[in-house]
């Protein structure tokens, strides 16, 4: 006696279709569980997918890798069934469960299906794969052309141009510049780019700037010495060279013992005019640096202000006599206020982080100072 024809409500059809769509299970398995014909369930699934596509409700992208993996598994299973990859796809459809395969591929994006075809084209017929995956062969070959094309989008080209320029600036700085200074250089060249973008590109290239390190205190005041007034008032750049000179002493780590560096910097040109290196911090160290700076200027520096902190080397009588001999006016900032001598502090930051800390030989610091 023939089996009576059953009637299914629209709600039941949608629910049954989603059992396949949401879980990724084979249609045959779900049809057996619901006691409905496999072909009928396939029809419901196709109708539901078309409805979802029309409404714009695509399956979440997170499911795509799983679906592509399922397609790959079924393609390779087809090869094992016949023992010959290309002929297996040309066998009659009734001998394999290609309909459940079609359900799996329905949730994957078109690009994912093209990528699957490109990965398996050596073992399977392209036309048959396109039919089973629900895509066109013309679309597949167009995908291959785009992927192999040497032309890139404007966004990608823009990023590549920035990579070249950022690398050039980083190398020109000796590997010391970070994203803020490279961004400033790019702005000076007319590039419109943010510091965050430069930082992201540098991270992708595996390059970075030099970071600050700790320091050792070298300012030792003489409580009995007479300190000079502050003639600068933090107005370091007075519009032309040789109006304000700044000076300070810093400590350098050396493999053969302690080493101290004193420098004189012109606050307008920011040029280091004179420097001296010694294994002590006596007044002679400062006097030697001052004599070198005066020599560089050819003695034409009378009236220039020599600004420093209140260290004992600068308040010493010998230093005062040397300044008077060259016509320099002494000026001193407040004790413990680094902003009063920010020019010299900036010089040490640049010198140490870009040159000294990167030296590997024991005598590198002395070589850099005298070069």
Image (cartoon, rainbow, N blue to C red):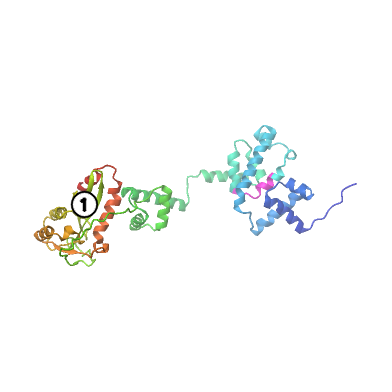
Residue 99, given in percent of the width and then of the height, sits at 71, 45
Tally of numbered tags = 1
What secondary structure is marked by label 1? strand
Camera-side residue: 4 or 357? 357
Q: Residue at x 68, y 46 (%)?
A: 102
Main SS of residues in magenta:
helix
Magenta range is 101-110
Left or right of residue 371, residue 21 in this image: right
Q: Residue at x 23, y 48 (%)?
A: 258
Camera-side residue: 32 or 84? 32
Left or right of residue 279, residue 136 in this image: right
Asked which quadrant contains residue 245, the reply is bottom left
Q: Which residue is mark 1?
A: 261
Q: Is residue 37 visible?
A: yes
Residue 174, given in percent of the width and then of the height, sits at 31, 48
- Relative to 301, does residue 62 appear above or below in the rendering? above
Residue 114, given in percent of the width and then of the height, sits at 59, 45
- Residue 106 belongs to the span the image colors magenta: yes
Give the class, few, some or many, for how many residues have Cα within 10 Å of label 1's Cα (few <14, many ≥20).
many
- Residue 371 belongs to the span the image colors magenta: no
């Amino acid at each position: 006696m023939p089996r009576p024809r059953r009637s299914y409500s629209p709600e039941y059809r949608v629910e049954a279709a989603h059992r396949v769509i949401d879980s990724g299970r084979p249609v045959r398995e779900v049809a057996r569980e619901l006691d409905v014909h496999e072909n009928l369930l396939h029809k419901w699934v196709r109708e539901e997918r078309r409805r979802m596509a029309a409404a714009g409700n695509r399956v979440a992208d997170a499911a795509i890798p799983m679906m592509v993996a399922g397609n790959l598994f079924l393609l390779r299973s087809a090869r094992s069934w016949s023992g010959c990859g290309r002929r297996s796809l040309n066998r009659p459809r009734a001998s394999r469960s290609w309909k459940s395969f079609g359900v799996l591929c329905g949730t994957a994006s078109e690009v994912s299906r093209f990528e699957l075809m490109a990965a398996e084209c050596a073992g399977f017929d392209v036309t048959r794969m396109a039919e089973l995956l629900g895509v066109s062969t013309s679309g597949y070959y167009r995908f291959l052309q785009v992927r192999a094309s040497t032309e890139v989008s404007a966004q990608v080209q823009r990023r590549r141009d920035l990579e070249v320029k950022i690398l050039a600036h980083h190398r020109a700085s000796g590997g010391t510049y970070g994203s803020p200074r490279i961004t400033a250089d790019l702005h000076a060249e007319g590039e419109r780019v943010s510091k965050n973008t430069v930082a992201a590109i540098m991270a992708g290239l595996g390059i970075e700037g030099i970071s600050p390190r700790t320091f050792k205190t070298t300012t030792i005041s003489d409580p009995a010495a007479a300190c000079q007034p502050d003639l600068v008032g933090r107005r370091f750049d007075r519009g032309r060279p040789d109006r304000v000179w700044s000076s300070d002493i810093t400590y350098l780590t050396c493999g053969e013992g302690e080493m101290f560096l004193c420098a004189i910097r012109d606050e307008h040109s920011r040029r280091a005019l004179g420097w001296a290196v010694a294994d002590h911090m006596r007044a002679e160290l400062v006097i030697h640096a001052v004599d070198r700076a005066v020599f560089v200027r050819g003695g034409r520096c009378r009236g220039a202000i020599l600004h420093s902190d209140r260290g004992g080397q600068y308040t010493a009588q010998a230093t005062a006599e040397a300044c008077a001999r060259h016509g320099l006016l002494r000026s001193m900032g407040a004790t413990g206020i680094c902003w009063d001598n920010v020019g010299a502090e900036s010089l040490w930051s640049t010198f140490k982080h870009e040159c000294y800390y990167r030296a590997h030989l024991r005598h590198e610091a002395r070589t850099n100072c005298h070069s």
